[in-house]
Amino acid sequence: MKITQQAREIAQRTEGAYSFDRFRNWGAIAQCLLDLGLTERQTEAVLLSKWTRWACDFDDSGAKYGYHTSTAMRRFMVSGNGINWEAVNDITIRTLGVEQ
């Protein structure tokens, strides 16, 4: 996966996130979310949320702590019938507030 400058910048801004250390490559997680169609703001909100922890909790790959990949995040985001955009918008507002 090629990680864009945009994804690298988002990853840097969110390095203090709750589940940062659960993943092998935080930039790849940001890129995965962008590739799924999330905006920069939505990507940042998801990275700062507990959704990343839940993605690891439900990861059935056998990955150990610190070695989860973007595949776990992708599976979590599209579980069910695809991305729940209403939930993405809700977590964005609850995490970052309403954009002015």
Image (spheres, rainbow, N blue to C red):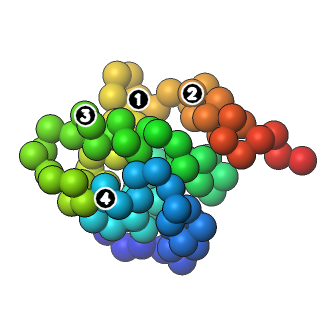
Residue at position x 34%, y 22% from top? 80
* Residue 36 rendering spot, x and y as whole percentages: 45, 48
* Classed neighbour count for the residue bearing mark 2: other residues with Cα under 10 Å, few (<14), some (14–19), many (≥20): few
Q: Earlier in the sequence, mark 4 or mark 3?
A: 4
Q: Which residue is mark 4?
A: 23
| Mark whose residue sits in front, 4 or 2 | 4
**Distance of mark 4 from mark 3, alpha carbons?**
13 Å
Q: Which residue is mark 3?
A: 58
Looking at the rendered structure, the secondary structure element under dot 4 is loop
- Name the mark on residue 82: 1
| Mark whose residue sits in front, 3 or 2 | 3
Mark 4–mark 2 CB contact (< 8 Å)? no
**Distance of mark 2 from mark 1, alpha carbons?**
12 Å
**Distance of mark 1 from mark 4, alpha carbons?**
22 Å
Q: Earlier in the sequence, mark 4 or mark 2?
A: 4
Looking at the rendered structure, the secondary structure element under dot 2 is helix
Residue at position x 33%, y 67% from top? 25
Left or right of 99, for residue 33: left
Q: Which residue is mark 2?
A: 87
* Classed neighbour count for the residue bearing mark 1: other residues with Cα under 10 Å, few (<14), some (14–19), many (≥20): few
